[in-house]
Image: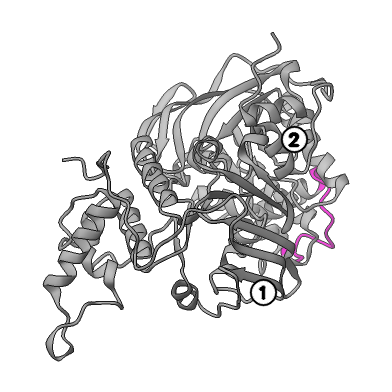
Amino acid sequence: MDIFSIKDNIKIICLGEVLMAANEGDYILHMKNIDMFFPGVKALKNVEFNLKRGEIHSLMGENGAGKSTLIKVLTGVYHKTNGQIEFNGNIIEPKTPLESQQLGISTVYQEVNLCANLTVAENIYIGREPRGKFGQIDWATMSAKAKKLLHNELGIDIDVNRVLNFYPVAMQQMIAIARAIDTKCRILILDEPTSSLSDNEVERLFAIMRKLKGMGISIIFISHFLEQIYTICDRITVLRDGSYVGEYEIKDLPRIELISKMMGKEIKEDQIESNVDKSVPKDENVIEFDHVTVPGKVKDLSMTIKKGEVVGLGGLLGSGRSEIAETIFGIMPVAEGTIKVDDVQVSVKSPMDQMKNRIAFCPEDRKVQGIIGDLSVRENIILALQAKDGMFRHMPRKKQNELADYYIDLLRIKVSDREQLIKNLSGGNQQKVIIARWLATEPNLLILDEPTRGIDVGTKTEIEALSVRLAKEKGMSVIFISGEMGEMVRTCSRVLIIRDHEKITELNGDEISTAHIMQAIAGDYHGNN
């Protein structure tokens, strides 16, 4: 039996009170002039958000745009610094998520926040259990109510007395939605609900969302999947860098314009930058992916990186670029597909496997994943090579000094001496130390994930030039990931466009321009011919 089957004649009933169908201008939520300050950080600046009754409204923006912060303000996780929230005609100041839920605002997160060891019925009615004589839980009534709720409202027939963990993630999300409905929610927030679902499961979820919309429930839908946004949503609000960009009808906002608004770049057809002075790769494969899948992270990826080429991964933040980089380096376990290194199929179980295959990875977050602040520049540079050699093959201090001095000179790292603590360097010089660490391992493939983020213009130019020089002069292959598309235009001989965690197309040679990359991300680029 299909546990997700939804009957065509599903009966739409009211839950506790009638939710009237909305007129066009009937709003249930106004968030006005919302500011959210943290020490040293202005996370939200004068943000607006307006939600109509019975609509599905997407909150869009790249990672770090402020979407999650705004939702946490609405649901009482954070207490706003300034601004006003008007819900159902009343000014509200939710202090906790429970208070927000009691008002009628419920959230279903990407990671289902239910209790895996409790039954389905217990999860739906936890804290609200029906009571019988002497105040004891009426288990039979609770099971009957849970079964009726799932059947009548979502068209789902399952054993509600099984523990939640028995069911797949998709079903757990449906159960979380059922709980939200039964708490008389007026607003349902779905935060990345489809990231771990199959295409069929997504369709089932969308069918349920449409039913909830028909009941007058307003849905805030947060997702990085553009196809899904344009399939299910009525309107879009765009945030960028913690600020409000605008509110748009989905039918009036072409995808290329949405991408432009999210990234802050207005693109015209004639703004084409030429792709010049790119190295020509040799006809030797360094790494090859054949239909590689990591559930929820990488979708059916096939690609080949050749010796001596700089390949860009283009896409919005959250599109899956970093996940692909981490899969190449062995951080993400591969569920399906094959990987070849130097035309030999390999089994990759850890980053150490790929280090031995001469693959190196400079991660996106140098503060958390890169530098070790209390170690010296020398110690940070030799770290990866020492790990590769093993703890019982200690590198002589003389060799450590030689390596550190060589790369300090090669990359022009500004230090007082090799023993200076790395935490005392500028961001750009910290980034150079991380690159030096991996160059010391003499890789055939170097992955640079946002290598220029947060550093000065001069150092950015040096890192771009270094990438091209390593490919051209050393025959090294480089994967270059950057949110600044101009960098990829200047640096890459090939750009793979990533959207919704899969490769959707590829740009080569003079196809590579800022305009074409943005068009490809939006699904509007179809080649020069």
Whether residue 260 is visible, yes or no, is yes
Tally of numbered discs: 2
Residue 367 image position (x, y, % from top left): 66, 60
Viewer-nearest residue: 368 or 247: 247
Residue 57 image position (x, y, % from top left): 56, 50
Residue type pointed to by label 1 = Lys
Whether residue 306 is visible, yes or no, is no
Is residue 513 in the magenta section?
Answer: no
Real-space CA distance between mark 2 and mark 1, rounded to the nearest whole angstrom: 34 Å
Is residue 415 in the magenta section?
Answer: yes
Image side of residue 228 versus residue 201, left or right:
right
Q: Which quarter of the rendered picture does the C terminus lie within?
A: top right
Report which residue position mark 1 lands on.
Answer: 80
Report which residue position mark 2 lands on.
Answer: 485
Q: Secondary structure at mark 1?
A: loop
Span shown in magenta? 409-422
The structure residue drawn at horizontal position 22% and vertical position 63%, both measured from the top left corner, is 146
The structure residue drawn at horizontal position 64% and vertical position 55%, both measured from the top left corner, is 365
Viewer-nearest residue: 315 or 85: 85
Residue type pointed to by label 2 = Met
Q: Check the image and report above or below for 52 versus 94.
A: above
Quadrant for residue 94, please give it. Answer: bottom right
Residue 18 image position (x, y, % from top left): 40, 63
